[in-house]
Amino acid sequence: MSAKEEILGRIRSALADAPAAEDIPREYRTSSEMSEEQLIEMLVDRLVDYKAGVDVIDAAQIPALVAAKLGQASSVVYPHGLDTGWLSALPQGIARRIDEPGARLSVAELDETSAVVTSSAVSIAESGTIILDGEPDQGRRAISLVPDHHVCIVPVSTIVQLLPEAMPRLTVTRPLTWISGPSATSDIELERVEGVHGPRVLDVLLVRGL
């Protein structure tokens, strides 16, 4: 018997005569009736409060806005499933690095990259949270956490108001990245420090018709 099996066996034995757990009341809201415009307004309000840059655009404007956001970047990484048309307006001087299975960039290479562009899975307006779930257009977690600047494409069709609305859209066993503004924390003197656990700059493009 392994140590793990022994520990789990002892836990089962200790809980053998435990009373059955009571049902947990789940009376919280699981759906909302906000319009698309109301969802956009709420999400923008939360993201701006978190000090993220936000633009509400049409799909045709994506290349131009991505280029504008990354005008000062020297290089950009993107996941292998991203629509490369979104990067078509980038200046020639910006090096493009694709991260794909079998040819993943090292942490050192990511650290040398100025920015990352990804899509997103679901966004929760009430908390201002954008969720990435590792789909090919979002990539693995490292590429959205190491570069200093994240440009995130959020299809308006993926915005919900409440957390209980978001969960059924996700596969919770996948590695999920929950983003609520640029990475920030406070030191012992309550001084805000940005870029500690992820990008220092977050630009969100909320895209209608996507």
Image (cartoon, rainbow, N blue to C red):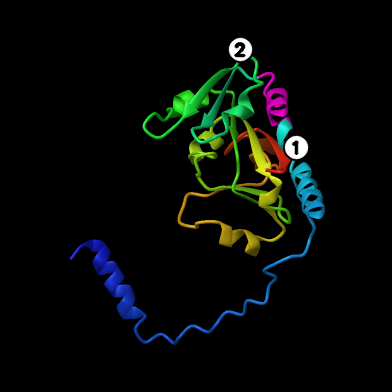
Q: Residues within 10 Å of mark 1 (few under 14, many from 20)?
A: some
Q: Residue furthest left?
A: 1
In the image, is residue 63 part of the stretch drawn in magenta?
A: yes
Q: Which residues are magenta?
A: 61-72
Residue 177: x %, y % from top left: 55, 47
Q: Which quarter of the figure is the N terminus placed in?
A: bottom left
Q: Which mark sits nearer the N-terminus, 2 or 1?
A: 1
Which image quarter: residue 48?
Answer: top right
Which residue is at 45% across, 29% downward? 107
Prevalent SS, magenta region: helix
Looking at the rendered structure, the secondary structure element under dot 2 is loop
Crowding around mark 2 (Cα neighbors within 10 Å: few <14, some 14 to 19, many 20+) is few
| Camera-nearest residue between 33 and 49 | 33
What is the distance, in whole Å, between disc 2 and disc 1 at their CAs?
26 Å
The residue under the point 67% across, 77% down is 27
Q: Quadrant of residue 63?
A: top right
Residue under circle 1? 58
Q: Is residue 186 left or right of residue 80?
A: right
Question: Is 176 on the left-hand or right-hand side of 105?
Answer: right
Q: Is residue 54 visible?
A: no
Q: Is residue 167 above or below residue 61?
A: below
Q: Where does residue 8 sit, x and y in percent of width and height?
A: 30, 69
Report if residue 37 is visible in the image.
Answer: yes
Q: Is residue 183 magenta?
A: no
In the foreground, 102 or 74: 102
Name above or below for residue 112 compared with residue 100. Answer: above
* Amino acid type at mark 1: Asp
Nearer to us of marks 2 and 1 is 1
Q: Which residue is mark 2?
A: 93
Q: Amino acid at mark 2?
A: Gly
Residue located at (55% from left, 34% from top): 82
